[in-house]
Image (tube, coloured by chain):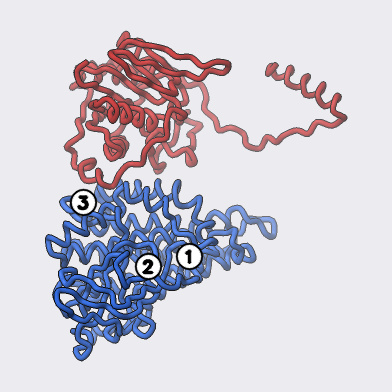
Chain colours: A blue, B red
Amino acid sequence: MDFDFTKQQKLARKIARNFAEKELEPFAQERDEKAEFPVEAVKKIAELGFMGITIPKEYGGCGLDTVTYVLIVEELARYCASTAIIVAVHNSVAAYPVYLLGTEAQKKKYLFDLASGKKLGAFALTEANAGSDPASIRTTAELKGENHVLNGVKTFITSGGTSDIVIVMASTDRSKRGRGITAFIVEKGIKGFTVGKKENKIGIRASDTCELIFENCVVPSENILGKPGGGLFAALKALSYGRIGVAAQALGVARCAMEECIKYSRERKQFGKQISDFQAIQWMIADMATEIEAARLLTLKAAGIKDEDRPFSAEDSMAKLYASEVAMRAATKAVQIHGGYGCMKDYKVERCFRDAKVIEIYEGTSEIQRLIIARSLLK
Amino acid sequence: MKGLKIIVAVKQVPGTDEVRTDPKTNSLIRQGVPGILNPEDRNAVEAALCLKEKHGAAVTALTMGPPEAGDVLEEVFAMGVDKGILLTDMAFAGSDTLITAFILSRAIIKSGRFDLILCGRHAIDGETAQVGPQIAGFMDLPQVTYAEEIVLEKGFITVRRDLEDCQEWVKVKLPAVVTVTSRINRPRYPSLYNVQTACDGSLLTTWGAEDLKVPASMLGLDASPTVIKKIFEPDHKKRGEIIPGDEKEMAASLIEKLKGVNVI
């Protein structure tokens, strides 16, 4: 077992860290407060290859592995969790399923633009009454000639308002429930497809989360991604990769919380000494470091399994579950260590706390991850 | 002019926030300190890449140091540099600026034809600003230091230097050595697209003392004339002084104090 990263992995991590430190961190707080999408940063990041990290070079990507992807997303999230999720969602649940399941024609038409970041991708599965239970979606796609007509409303879609290409899950046969769900590649701007309400969230505020409305939206049937009725399979493949990205994002947030505590506890003095001299503080920081390291190993293991194309038993869910809960615990301790200041928006740990709560919920709640893990053991 | 060939000398230096010194050996403690690409060398790389984009050029980066110094070459490959030469050998260890410049100039000669050698003005560890000019000395080339703009035209470069009281334009025939400041440009970020090629070894050449055909007696600490008398960390405890009195008294007192420390 080799715990050292390759030269490529180290260099990619360095590139991501330098970029995030200089281009993301200085504006992260303001964008969070204004709930402002990082338009310029995403443009710059796309030029540097961040939107097609694991897509092979022949389709316009960088051809790097999933371990590298984890390192990159962690670095971005360390400085701006919102930008990290924009990048992660685009890579894992928008570009990746097109690469994995798309026809050559679909890859030519969509994958190059996605991998180069010329177009931003999103993934639309969740509905008001179908979150943890995706088989119960109500959006329908009815076959009419050479097209499908989509009707329904998707909710909480990351990059919903800013994306150009959306992978939409719709039911082509409701009687079959999960097996009647089909994935479609849908372009923004087509008739019958509008963006609804932009959500005002607790955290991850610079990433736009929107409602997508399909009203007699005509999509060519050639835009079916994978097989008709294979949508849930596509979704599960994409979400598995998505969970690894969100776990990496959680690592970045947890690390930010811990590093801010190390800095603050050395500066803050009470009872005539630095608070880092108090064991109560030391133990909290030691716990954060230990848990972050464990979460990182779990996440890297899931990434390694994906790179070797071995089947997951539930490592991707374990990584997402554990890393997101580690981020929440680390952020909670970080606010505690900062005391009153931790409750103020001037301090980064306040943002970490709000961001971590979102991470525990999206891409499958902790409870759904536990369900998946339990099923893998009890099947 | 045939295809322009540019050599950029780069150096791996310790990340500045974490530099510590060993008072016993008078040297920097490099162990456990992350190495970074010297900031103004990054500007030199950017200047080379800008010339490449405008006029077409082959850009080779050159560095000397322990094997880990190759990391900075990988980083500049990811910025778009075409090739790199790593000079690494135990015989090079402890070389001062003069011997370093000697080794670099031998490597430049061995690398073949070149038109322009670019260096950062100075490195943030030693802060000497000597290596660029010394390379020019060893190679008997014209040099322009502190460049803030470089314009290339028919076998010449015209370089802008911003001095304290004036702006100077210097026209030099190629080949020449130019050292650049951080104000010359805003370096691009390395690209993830280049990571695979940057790290697969295909762009890298490694040379030691034997490759340069230089006897060990002319290399390293023993051959270096520089002697470091003392190295110490600056005292951060010194605080500002508030000068009392009315405006005239304060001004007079300040002038006396500045005269006293030979500032005016």
Give the image location of residue A114, x and y in percent. Answer: 26, 57
Q: Residue furthest left?
A: A104
Looking at marks 2 and 3 on the same chain, the residue that comes earlier in the sequence is marked by: 3
Kindly indicate the quadrant of the structure image that contains residue A79: bottom left
Looking at marks 3 and 1 on the same chain, the residue that comes earlier in the sequence is marked by: 3
Q: Which residue is mark 1?
A: A205
Label disc, if present, on residue A60 of the rendered structure: 3
Q: Which residue is mark 2?
A: A160
Q: How many marks?
A: 3
Rendered residue at 15%/69% (across/down): A222
Dot 3: few (<14), some (14–19), or many (≥20) neighbours within 10 Å?
many
- Asked if badge 3 and badge 1 are on a common chain, one would say yes
Rendered residue at 16%/62% (across/down): A106
**Element class at badge 3:** loop
- Tell me the kind of residue under disc 2: Gly
Looking at marks 2 and 1 on the same chain, the residue that comes earlier in the sequence is marked by: 2
**Element class at badge 2:** loop
**Element class at badge 1:** loop
Kindly indicate the quadrant of the structure image that contains residue A220: bottom left
Rendered residue at 28%/23% (across/down): B7
Q: Is residue B254 left or right of residue B17?
A: right
Q: Chain of mark 3?
A: A
